[in-house]
Amino acid sequence: MALLEVENVRRSFGGVVAVDKVSFRTNVGQIKAVIGPNGAGKTTLFNIVSGILSSETGRIMFKNKVIGGLRPHQIARAGISRTFQNPSLFLQVSVLENVMVGRHVRTRSGFLRCCLTGPGQRREERAIREAAMAQLDYVGLADLASMPAGSLAFGQRRMVELARALATEPDLLLLDEPASGLNTRETHDLGELIRRIRERGVTILIVEHDMSLVMDISDEILVLHNGIPIAEGAPSVIQNNQQVISVYLGGEIQGAVAG
């Protein structure tokens, strides 16, 4: 069953087309990857799905409802959360407080009520703190909860951002180049974590340049070239697609043959 349906999406910037005629489906429980070289339109596509950008044509459906035109916080409330190429954290506050920011999407209190100090608000704040700590523990950073986010190593910052995204209780998680800047061991651990997140019932759409990671964890792969889809299918199909090999992978995947 399709959780996310993208139909004929197009977006241009000053006459330069970033994505064009992009259509695909992400089914419930899938790990689906979007690959392509720099400038292929991958992050633009993510920005459209998450509401940061609007599409000029087409339609985006999530849980059988149109979400095109909604603001990012509305899309987050609907059940889509994301990370960014460069971790976007509040560096001067604690790791825990960064994750708590994500959890506020699932609270009943508006901004004004959060400024009050009644029993209901205190209970909700405790619940937010506990939920945020649970996500930090899940990604292995509970012992760093009180540290300023700016004091962490790059890989740890990525995990904080991931914990914050998970704190929103997403049905669909968008991961934008999560392995960028990670070493081999960290990338391996990331792959294991992504699998565990899927086992929690979270569907995952990932943009990634690390082909070993992509081929290892993905159920399906969408390949973009100059903003246009050129191939889609299982890893075994993609790695044996002659056009993908010649245009993108350049022989990076061992054993690939023409198909």
Image (cartoon, grey):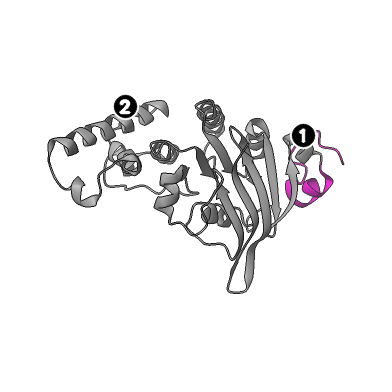
Left-right relation of 233 to 119: right
Looking at the picture, how far across and down is residue 201, in whole percent?
Answer: 52, 29
Find the magenta span and give its range: 241-259
Mark 2, residues whose alpha carbon is within 10 Å: few (<14), some, or many (≥20)?
few
- Disc 2 versus disc 1: nearer the observer: 1
Secondary structure of the residue carrying tag 1 is: helix
Q: Amino acid at mark 1?
A: Ser
Res. 143 mark: 2
Q: Amino acid at mark 2?
A: Asp
Quick one: 155 or 129, which is closer to the camera?
129
- Which residue is rendered at x = 18% and y = 39% of the image? 121
Quick one: 86 or 130, which is closer to the camera?
130
- Which residue is rendered at x = 50% and y = 29% of the image? 197
Does the magenta run of residues contain 112?
Answer: no
Secondary structure of the residue carrying tag 2 is: helix
What residue occupies the far front of the structure in this picture? Answer: 64
Q: Distance of mark 2 from mark 1, alpha carbons?
A: 40 Å
Q: Give the vertical position of 146 relative to 48 (above or below).
A: above
